[in-house]
Image (cartoon, rainbow, N blue to C red):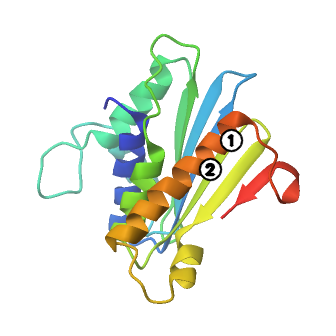
Amino acid sequence: MRELSLNILDIAQNSVSAGATRIDIDVLESSGAHTLTIRISDNGCGMSEETVKRVQDPFYTTRTTRKVGMGIPLFKMAAEMTGGSFSIESEVGKGTVVTAVFCTDSIDFTPLGNVEDSICALASMNENIDFVYTRRLDEREFVFSSGEIRTMLDGVPMNEPSVMQWLGEYLAEQVAALRRAEPSENQGGQQQA
């Protein structure tokens, strides 16, 4: 995939298919260590140890619409090509955690892309799932919860075009504020939605 945000979208969709009601997406950047860690965790049905091994094989998929499953293998390869690492932890009935660490100073580092658009799409397409997105740059972070936004909307659907536009702009503003290293108005450097 050309952007890591597309990998995030694909793996989060796997979590949706696994019956998750909460999906945490963490994008953690360390400029000093030159690393980007992407962690996607869910409370879905989980996988057996054997299935965890098989999902890393591009010729295995549980989907009936295609014969190969490239999402996890490509994500793993993208991380490992940079000198980073990849892991999947899962327990049947408890959920799954996928973690990829990328070395951002590697020539093989895939651009992150627009994670905020992926979060917006996931939240608007899956009204019954709480997506919690944490974006951290060194010591600064913000946290977004689609469940909290849904409560604030008081019945207005998240896939309403004006809500989606506002959500996309809001998430983009939060990332821009992290990049500008602006101190937060609350909690000494943490920005929370």
* Percent coordinates x, y for residue 4 in the rendering: 42, 36
Q: Residue at x 64, y 26 (%)?
A: 35
Q: What residue type is labelled 2?
A: Gln
Q: Please identify the residue farthest to the top as the structure is shown.
A: 107
Tell me if residue 146 comes above or below residue 27 in the rendering: below
Which one is in front, 52 or 150? 150
Q: Which amino acid does label 1 sit on?
A: Leu
Left or right of 162 on screen, residue 83: right
Identify the mark at residue 174; answer none if there is no mark: 2
Q: Which residue is drawn at 43% across and 41% down?
A: 114
Left or right of 13 on screen, residue 185: right
Q: Quadrant of the C terminus?
A: bottom right
Left or right of 143 on screen, residue 80: left
The answer to whether residue 165 shows anywhere in this view is yes
Identify the mark at residue 168; answer none if there is no mark: none
Q: Which residue is drawn at 82% across and 45% down?
A: 183
> Pointers 2 and 1 in contact (CB under 8 A)?
yes
Q: How crowded is mark 1: few (under 14 residues within 10 Å), some or many (20 or more)?
A: many
Q: Please identify the residue farthest to the right as the structure is shown.
A: 188
Identify the mark at residue 178; answer none if there is no mark: 1
Q: How far apart are marks 2 and 1 (CA)?
A: 6 Å
Which one is in front, 162 or 174? 162
* Percent coordinates x, y for residue 105 in the rendering: 59, 14
